DNA sequence: ATGGAGATAGTCT
DNA sequence: GACTATCTCCATC
């Protein structure tokens, strides 16, 4: 697989409804370029959050930490959680909404697997089946905060395999207590790479 | 196979 | 001072 055949997702892709973007990101490829190496993973699990949703980090307004969620769509919003982990989101929402993003929860490792293993530590078998794990495997931290995902660079998302609607499963989001009635977690049915 | 505790630190009240 | 959009390890079934 050569990098030249990758097709970056355009800015307009991220200007759709957040839950729609979350579903359409399934099957796309997350591409990380670091120290001359390339890491690629197929996105298999996502969650949608937007400003009118009590579980969204932007719900209580703009702060220094969540400002990227209010910025232009197609950029990376990264947050630090539980004193130990980073999680990666793609800013995505309709133009008339102020903020929203899609949490990338799990990917299927495709390229650079030995580098991912090095970042994770060899004791672990599960490389990227959870938001904290995939951030660690892809060397994603605050340095990439606000990165434009629609441009060739250290972190980007490119078009991938299209996923049939009937192989997309939705469920309540994981690890939150608010708005559990919203089934805004999406994953590829029968994928062995999802977080649970 | 499943469950609970502990690690650990940024962010907001 | 409380609260996380988590993970790993070790316990017990």
Image (tube, coloured by chain):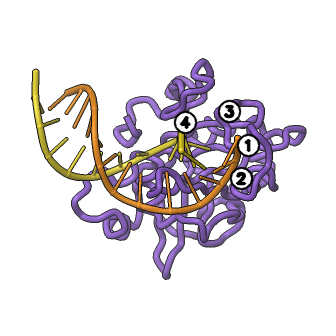
Chain colours: A purple, B orange, C yellow
Real-space Cα separation, disc 2 to disc 1, in angstroms: 6 Å
- Both labels 2 and 1 in a single chain: yes
The answer to whether the residue labelled 2 contacts the one labelled 3, judged by CB atoms less than 8 Å apart, is: no
Disc 4/disc 3 C-alpha distance (Å): 15 Å
- Upstream in the sequence, badge 4 or badge 3? 3
Query: Which image quadrant is residue A93 in?
Result: top right
Mark 1 vs mark 3, foreground winner is: 1
- Measured as percent of width and height from the top left, residue A78 is found at 61, 57
- Disc tally is 4
Q: Secondary structure at mark 3?
A: helix
Q: Which residue is mark 1?
A: A58
- Let me know if marks 1 and 3 both belong to one chain: yes
Q: Where A28 sits versus A143, above or below?
A: above
Q: Residue furthest top?
A: A181
- Residue at left offset 74%, top offset 58%: A64
Task: Please give the name of the residue rendered at 46% of the width and 46% of the height, measured from the top-left corner.
Answer: A106
Sequence order check, earlier mark of 4 and 1:
1
Residue sitting at x 47%, y 50%: A82
- What residue does disc 2 label? A66
Q: Which residue is the site of mark 4?
A: A163
Quarter of the picture containing the C terminus of chain A is: top left
Q: Are the two marked residues, 2 and 1, in contact with CB atoms closer than 8 angstroms?
A: yes
Front of the two marks 2 and 3: 2
Q: Nearer the viewer, residue A24 or A100?
A: A100
């Amino acid at each position: 697989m050569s990098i030249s055949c990758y097709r970056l997702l355009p800015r307009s892709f991220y200007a759709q409804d957040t839950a729609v973007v979350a579903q359409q990101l399934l099957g796309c490829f997350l591409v990380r370029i670091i120290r001359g190496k390339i890491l690629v993973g197929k996105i298999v699990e996502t969650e949608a959050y937007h400003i009118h949703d009590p579980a969204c980090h932007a719900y209580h307004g703009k702060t220094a930490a969540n400002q990227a969620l209010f910025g232009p769509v197609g950029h990376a919003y990264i947050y630090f959680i539980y004193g130990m982990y980073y999680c990666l989101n793609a800013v995505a929402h309709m133009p008339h909404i102020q903020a929203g993003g899609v949490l990338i929860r799990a990917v299927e490792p495709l390229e650079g697997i030995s580098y991912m293993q090095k970042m994770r530590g060899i004791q672990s078998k599960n490389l990227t089946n959870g938001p904290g794990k995939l951030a660690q495997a892809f060397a994603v931290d605050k340095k990439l905060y606000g990165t434009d995902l629609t441009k060739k660079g250290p972190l980007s998302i490119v078009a991938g395999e299209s996923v049939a609607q009937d192989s997309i499963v939705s469920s309540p989001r994981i690890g939150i207590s608010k708005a559990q009635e919203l089934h805004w977690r999406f994953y590829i049915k029968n994928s062995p790479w999802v977080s649970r």
